[in-house]
Image (tube, rainbow, N blue to C red):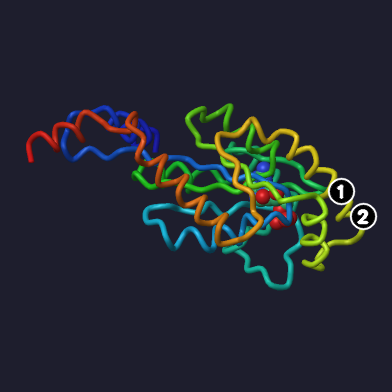
Amino acid sequence: MGDERRSGRDRRTSTDPDALKRGILFVMTGASGVGKDSIRRVALPQLEGIHYSVSATTRERRPDEVDGANYHFLTRERFQELLGQNGLLEHAEYVGDYYGTPYEPVEEALAMGKDVLLELELVGARQVKARVPEAVMVFIAPPSMRELERRLRGRGTDSEEKIQKRLARAREEIRAMREFDYVVVNEDLYTAASVFVSVIRAERARAHRISDSDIARTLSG
Ligand code: 5GP
C-alpha cells in the first residue's frame, strides 16, 4: 500500500503521458438538518468520477437508513479499535456519538485519480484541512436558524434534548463558515445542488491542476 500511495502522488508531476492524476478531496460541512445529504443525492448523479465516502458512526441507525450505504454503524468498541489502528482519516464526537472517516477507501480512490466527497461536522472538517491542506472545503448554510430548526423537527428522529444540542452545534458551525473556501446557501434544494455542482466543476478546471503530462498530451495531439 505504501508504494502504491507514493506512486499515486509521484505520477501527478510525472511527464509520462499515461500518468494518473491524484483525485481532489472535497469536504462538505454544515449543520445537521441543513440538507447535505439531499444536495449530494441531487448533485452526484450530475458528476462523474466522484466517490462518496461512507462514514463510520456509533449513532443508532434510523429506520430509513441502511448499514454500509448511509453509514457503517459500529459499536463503540469497534469504533475505538478502528481509531487505535489509525484507520480513520478524522473523527469527532457529535451530540453523544462518534463519527469518523475510514481512511483506506478514501486513499484508494484518490490514488486512482477519483475525486472524493466527505460529509463532516466542523471538528472533523478542521482535522482534514490540517492533514490535507489542498482539500476543497464547502460549507452549506441554512437560510436562517428558524428554517433549520423547522427542518430538524420535521425529520422527527431526535429527542428535544438532541434537537437543542444539534442547534447549539449549528450556531458554532455557522460562526465558522468563513474558514471554508465556498459557502452554498440551501434555501432551495435544486439551486443549492446546482451551485455545489458548479463548485466541483470549477475546482476541477483550475489551472494549477494541469500537469506536465497534460501539456505534453495537448502538444503531441
Ligand atoms: P447525523 O447524525 O445527522 O447523521 O450526523 C451528525 C453530524 O455528523 C452531521 O453534521 C454529519 O455531517 C456529521 N458527520 C457524518 N459523518 C461524519 C464523519 O465521518 N466525521 C465527522 N467528523 N462528522 C461526520
Q: Which mark is residue 23?
A: none
- Camera-side residue: 218 or 21? 218
* Residue 41 lies in quadrant: bottom right
Which quarter shows the C terminus?
top left
x and y percent of residue 185 in the render?
64, 49
Q: Position of residue 79 (x, y in %)?
A: 69, 48
| Rendered residue at 47%/30% (across/down) | 134
In the depicted structure, whether residue 159 falls above or below residue 219: below
The answer to whether 162 appears left or right of 8 in the picture is: right
Count of numbered marks: 2
Seen at 41% across and 45% down, the residue is 108
Gap between marks 1 and 2 measured at Cα: 6 Å
**Residue that label 1 marks:** 165
Element type where label 1 sits in the image: helix
The amino acid beneath tag 2 is Glu
- The image's mark for residue 161 is 2
